[in-house]
Image (cartoon, grey):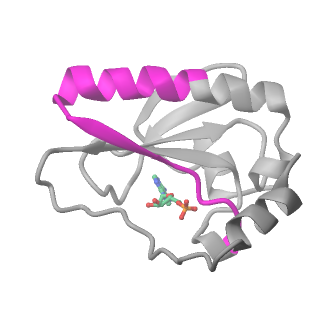
Amino acid sequence: METIFTKIRDGVIPSVKLHEDELCFVILDINPVNKGHLLVITNECHPTLADCPEATLAHLMGVVQRADAKLREALGCDATNIVINNGEESGQEVKHLHIHVIPRYKGDQKHFRLAKEHYEEGEMERLGRRLEF
Ligand code: AMP
C-alpha cells in the first residue's frame, strides 16, 4: 500500500531523514510538538500495530531508544513522549505504523493528558479477568 510515508521512504516526497536501516527509517515530523519531534517509521507499510511482525516491533523499540538518547544529547531535552496512535479513532492520521518521539522540557506546557475514568466497586477486578492473556 502506498502512503505518504512510502513516498518519503522512496524520496518522492522530501524529508529530513535522520536514520535508515533494513526495517525502518526516521524523519523529523513536519509539524513538531517541540522542535526535534521525530517519527520512527517501518519501511514496509503495516497500517497498525497488529499488522506488524513482532521482530520488527522489537527492532523499532531499539531505534526509539537510540533516538531518545540523541534528542537528550543534542537538544538537552529533559524527557520524551513516546507515542503510537494506533487506529483512526486514536487519532492516527497516516495509516502506516510509526512511533512519535517528542522532546519535552521542564515547564514547556505541552501537556499530554487523556481524560480519565473511575471504576465502580469490583469492576476493575472483573475487567482484569476478562483482559488476562
Ligand atoms: P499520526 O497522527 O500519528 O498518524 O501522525 C502523523 C504525523 O505525520 C503527524 O505528526 C504529521 O505532522 C506527520 N507528517 C505528515 N506529513 C509529513 C511529512 N510530509 N513530513 C514529515 N512529517 C509528516
Residue 23: % across, % down: 72, 26
Q: Residue furthest front?
A: 121
Left or right of 18 on screen, residue 47:
right
Residue 40 figure quarter: top right
Residue 131: % across, % down: 83, 57
Left or right of 48 on screen, residue 68:
left
Task: Specify the quadrant that holds the N terminus.
Answer: bottom right
Residue 49: % across, % down: 76, 49
Residue 121 figure quarter: bottom right
Compared with residue 54, is residue 113 higher up or lower down, i.e. above or below?
A: below
- The segment highlighted magenta reads 62-88
Residue 82: % across, % down: 47, 44
Compared with residue 20, is residue 122 higher up or lower down, i.e. above or below?
A: below
Compared with residue 23, is residue 36 higher up or lower down, i.e. above or below?
A: below
Q: Which residue is painted at 51% across and 29% down in the image?
A: 64
Q: Which residue is painted at 48% across and 24% down in the image?
A: 65
Q: Which residue is painted at 27% across and 63% down in the image?
A: 111
Residue 31 figure quarter: bottom left
Left or right of 117 on screen, residue 31:
left
Residue 14 in the magenta stretch? The answer is: no
Q: Nearer the viewer, residue 128 or 106?
A: 128
Q: Residue furthest left?
A: 107
